[in-house]
Structure formats: C-alpha cells, structure tokens
Image: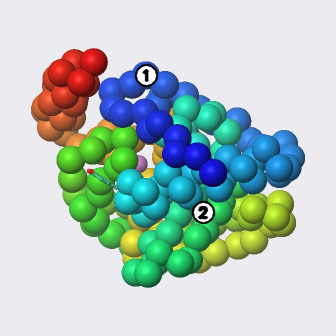
Amino acid sequence: MALLPILEFPDPRLRTVAKPVAQVDDRIRTLIDDMFETMYDAPGVGLAATQVNIHEQIIVIDTSEDKNEPLVFINPEIEVLDEDLLGYEEGCLSVPGFYEEVTRPSHVKVNALGRDGKPFTLEPDGLLAVCIQHEIDHLKGKLFVDYVSNIKRQRIRTKLEKQHRSKA
Ligand code: QAP
Ligand code: CO
C-alpha cells in the first residue's frame, strides 16, 4: 500500500480528461487500494484518479460515518432522474481549506464497474449523490470551484498559489 501525492488547484493536470479503463486487472486494483489509503489518510470522503495524476476513469468514495463502506466506480455513467436540486457545502482534497455551496441534481442513477470488473447500478441520494457527481466532474477535468463566482475562484487560486510558493 502507498500514499499518493494529491494535485492541488490550480495545477493544470487537474484539467485532464480521463480515459476509460479497458481492463480491470491487478494494476487497477493496486491503484484503487492506494487511492483508498490516500483518501482515508487525508481524511476525505471521495477521491478521483485525476487527483493523483492518473488519467483513467476510477473513483473511490466512502461517505459512511464509520469509514467502513468503501465504494469503487470504474468507467461511471450518470443519468439525472428528475429536476430536483440539492445545495451542499462542498470541499475537495485538491482545494484544501476552501468550502463553497454548490447546487446539483439530487436524484441520479449511476452505472459503473466495481473492483471485480462487474457492472452495477446505484441510485444514491443526499451526500453520496453529491459526492459521485463531484468525483465524476474530476474525471472530466472539472472542479467544484468552477461553479462559484469568478471573484471567489480567483481568491482561492491566489491563496493556494501563495501557499504553494511558500512550501516550495
Ligand atoms: C468531495 O471531498 C465532496 O479542504 C470529497 O482541508 C466533499 O473528501 C463531495 C478535505 C463534500 C461532497 C461534499 C477537504 C480534507 C476533504 C479539505 C473531500 C481539507 C481536508 C474533501
Ligand atoms: Co474533489
């Protein structure tokens, strides 16, 4: 097992569009295990492969209280089920220290492959529905800060760039 370095906004590599996984093999399963270790260590509730600079369609999520309900989504496809929207104060391991309200569809259906390579379907709601949409955005090169005002996003960018400079 290994902790993977997490890319931080505004790193341009976070804008890369991920490719589908052709075969769920041991290389992919090792990556998934390392992604869970990295997410639990942070700690976070969701992590997309994009955030660890791997541009393949893989997401790990655990929104459970006791951190014992790991979910894996490979090549996820999402469908919006109705017009209902849900506002949620989102954060991101790639935007540390910043939280903003984002509004998204509240009822979605997700088709994906699991860690075993087998297809499954889920109809999440609440935090899980928000989290899956946030993570699928990462696979498309999109970040939650893209939904906030230009002025807020620019402030976040400047503060994180300053932190990155003082760490370098
Ligand atoms: C995405 O985000 C998410 O700023 C997952 O300093 C978040 O796990 C979806 C984290 C909320 C829906 C709602 C953020 C950790 C973790 C930080 C995360 C931080 C340390 C974020
Ligand atoms: Co994120």
Residue in the picture at 70% in, 54% down: 74
Amino acid marked by disc 1: Pro
Looking at the image, how many numbered discs can be counted on the residues?
2
Query: Residue 88: horizontal and vertical position, in percent?
Result: 28, 65
Image coloring type: rainbow
Q: Residue at x 24, y 24 (%)?
A: 167
The reply to whether residue 100 is visible in this rendering is yes
- In this view, the residue farthest toward the bottom is 66
Q: Residues within 10 Å of mark 2 (few under 14, many from 20)?
A: few
- Give x and y (percent) for residue 62: 50, 69
Residue 79, quarter of picture: bottom right
Q: Front-most of 119 and 64?
A: 64
Q: Is residue 156 above or below residue 166?
A: below
Residue labelled with disc 2? 79
First in residue order: circle 2 vs circle 1: 1
The residue sitting at 21% across, 53% down in the picture is 100
Disc assigned to residue 12: 1
**Which of label 2 and label 1 is nearer to you?**
1
Relative to the observer, which residue lies in front, 135 or 34? 34
Q: Position of residue 73 (x, y in %)?
A: 65, 59
Task: Give the residue type at disc 2.
Answer: Glu
Task: Quarter of the image for the C terminus: give it.
Answer: top left
SS of the residue under disc 1: helix
**Could you tell me which secondary element the residue under label 2 belongs to?**
strand
Disc 1 crowd, CA 10 A, few/some/many (<14, 14-19, 20+): few
**Mark-to-mark CA distance, 2 and 1:** 28 Å
* Mark 2 CB lies closer than 8 A to ligand 1: no
> Residue at the location (18% across, 21% down)?
166
- CB within 8 Å, label 2 to label 1: no
